[in-house]
Image: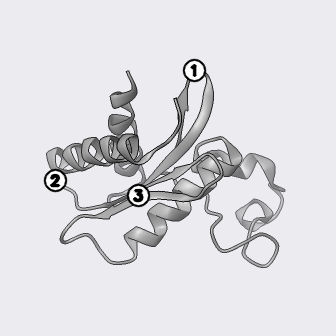
Amino acid sequence: MKMNLELAKSLINKAISQAENMGIFCSVVVVDDKGFLVAAYRMDSALIPTLDIARDKAWTAAVFRTPSSEVNKYGDPSKANAGFNTQNWNDRLTTIPGGLPVESAGKVIGSMGVSGGDPGEDVQVCRGALEVLE
């Protein structure tokens, strides 16, 4: 299976349904395995910055092949933010929870990012959306 628009739409629709059930307004972004945008959606009433934040979470999860919240393991824990910042990396990197890889047959085919709730809610929406792969 490869990431494509059809799969991205399914993930986004499931995520939006999950967010509505939780009573939160969020943005959802799906990228391919290289971090390139496939699809994005901002719910009505979601704060405007949530779309960029969701994209950053998705990009980070895709290129590191790990949840965005676990990327700090690649950094220097003795430095603030594990040594990651836009001066020594880029403006897409984030360690905020809410970005998860999308896997098929044990291989990362893309990732998704959610922003709008608290970090735990964003992860919950992502996990709920990934159920479409089961």
Which of pointers 3 and 1 lies earlier in the amino acid sequence?
A: 3
How busy is the neighbourhood of tag 1: few (under 14 within 10 Å), some, or many (20 plus)?
few
Residue beneath the point at 79% across and 49% down? 74
Q: Give me the C-alpha separation between circle 2 and circle 3.
A: 23 Å
Asked if residue 99 can be seen in this view, the reply is: no
Residue beneath the point at 15% across and 44% down? 21
Q: Which mark lies nearer to you, 2 or 3?
A: 3
Asked if residue 28 can be seen in this view, the reply is: yes
Instruction: Identify residue type, mark 2.
Output: Gly
Q: Give me the C-alpha separation between circle 1 and circle 2.
A: 33 Å
Which image quadrant is residue 133 in? top left
Q: Position of residue 134 (x, y in %)?
A: 37, 21
Element at label 2: loop
Is there a contact, CB below 8 Å, between mark 3 and mark 1? no
Q: Which residue is mark 2?
A: 23
Q: Which residue is mark 1?
A: 105
Q: Which residue is mark 3?
A: 39
Q: Give me the C-alpha separation between circle 3 and circle 1.
A: 22 Å
Is there a contact, CB below 8 Å, between mark 2 and mark 3? no
- Asked if residue 6 is positioned above or below residue 1 in the image, the reply reads below
Element at label 1: loop
- Asked if residue 49 is positioned above or below residue 16 in the image, the reply reads below
Which image quadrant is residue 46 in? bottom left
Which of pointers 2 and 3 lies earlier in the amino acid sequence?
A: 2
Q: What is the number of callouts on the image? A: 3
Instruction: Identify residue type, mark 1.
Output: Ala
Residue beneath the point at 56% across and 49% down? 32
Q: Position of residue 108 (x, y in %)?
A: 61, 35
Res 29 label: none
